Image: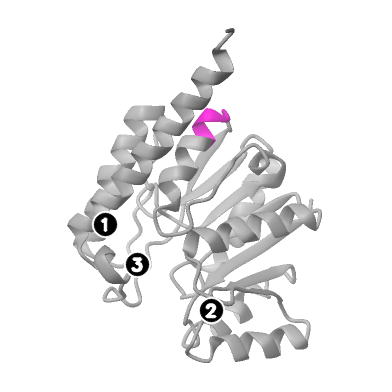
């Protein structure tokens, strides 16, 4: 079973060296997708790639978090990996939990193994920003009502994806609203989903999304609009597929 650890980064010079050092304790199959960083992260990663410590993809312009994941999925497929495990490069996901994901992969009963920061609260969990938790819970509830998932955390980026299952998805949402396309397509493709608990970590609760998305109301409305468009697209494709004209 070949597993790729994929880490999207954008201006993470403060954290990325430490994160990668920890990840290398568990795997040497590491892909970093640098989304046109401007703080020195690019140069740091280029040197690590030169030494053979990581594989590196770099966007020449900022493409967005979702596009970084999409590119990681494509890389994993093109290079013959069975699973791609995504995690953030800012110390918000604990590399020590990588073996827990691997054990879940080995059970071979799921296509998406999604980390949840709320499935099993821990005494060492951090306190999340109120607006982020509220938006997450609102959208998780909506997704559960639509697709009967039983999710507790729709926005955790700590996930394992079966590469062969990802071929059934057509993902093109490049920004932070990526989960609002991902989960409807996972449901439409009838992929098997399970959650496993991960620690809730917020080292820097003041980090920004950027632009209008820094306003919680705008962010929620944007996510809902992406979800609506994806539902409309799936409904249209289903109608065309069932049409016998």
Above/below status of 77 relative to 24: above
Image quarter for residue 144? top left
Residue shown at the point (26%, 57%) measured from the top left: 219
Q: Are circles 2 and 3 on residues that touch, CB within 8 Å?
A: no
Left or right of 108 in this view: 227: left
Q: As displayed, is residue 12 above or below residue 217? A: below
Q: Which residue is mark 1?
A: 219
Q: Specify which label sits upstream in the sequence, 1 or 2.
A: 2
From the top left corner, tell me how far across and down residue 92 is, in percent.
Answer: 43, 69
Crowding near the residue tagged with mark 3, few <14, some 14–19, many ≥20 C-alpha atoms within 10 Å? few
What secondary structure predominates along the stretch shown in magenta? helix
Q: Quadrant of residue 208?
A: bottom left
Q: CA distance from mark 2 to mark 3?
A: 33 Å
Within the magenta stretch, is there residue 19?
A: no
Looking at the image, can residue 202 be seen? yes
Reading the image, the residue beneath label 2 is: 36
Dividing the picture into quarters, in which one does residue 235 lie? top left
Q: Is residue 99 visible?
A: no
> In the rendering, at what x and y percent does residue 242 appear?
56, 13
Start-end of magenta stretch: 186-190
- Please state the horizontal and vertical placement of residue 14, each as a whole percent of the image: 46, 88
- Label 1: which secondary element: helix
What residue did someone put label 3 on? 124
> How many residues crowd mark 1 within 10 Å: few (<14), some (14–19), many (20+)?
many
**3 left or right, relative to 195:** right
The residue tagged with tag 3: helix, strand or loop?
A: loop
């Amino acid at each position: 079973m070949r597993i790729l650890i994929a880490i999207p980064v954008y201006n993470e010079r403060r954290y990325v060296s430490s994160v990668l050092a920890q990840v290398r304790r568990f795997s040497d199959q590491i892909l970093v997708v640098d989304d046109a960083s401007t703080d020195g992260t690019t140069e740091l990663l280029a040197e690590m790639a030169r030494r053979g410590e990581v594989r590196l993809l770099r966007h020449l312009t900022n493409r967005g978090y979702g596009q970084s994941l999409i590119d990681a999925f494509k890389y994993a497929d093109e290079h013959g990996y069975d699973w791609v495990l995504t995690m953030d490069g800012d110390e918000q996901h604990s590399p020590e939990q990588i073996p827990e994901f691997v054990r879940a992969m080995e059970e071979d009963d799921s296509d998406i193994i999604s980390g949840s920061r709320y499935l099993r609260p821990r005494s060492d969990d951090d306190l999340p920003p109120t607006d982020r938790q509220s938006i997450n819970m609102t959208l998780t509830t909506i997704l559960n009502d639509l697709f009967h998932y039983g999710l507790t955390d729709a926005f955790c980026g700590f996930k394992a994806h079966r590469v062969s299952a990802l071929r059934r998805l057509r993902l093109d949402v490049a920004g932070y609203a990526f989960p609002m396309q991902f989960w409807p397509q996972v449901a439409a493709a009838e992929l098997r989903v399970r959650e496993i608990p991960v620690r809730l970590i917020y080292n820097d609760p003041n980090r920004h999304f950027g632009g209008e998305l820094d306003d919680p109301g705008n962010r929620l409305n944007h996510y809902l609009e992406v979800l609506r468009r994806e539902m409309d697209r799936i409904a249209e494709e289903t109608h065309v597929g069932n049409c016998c004209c």
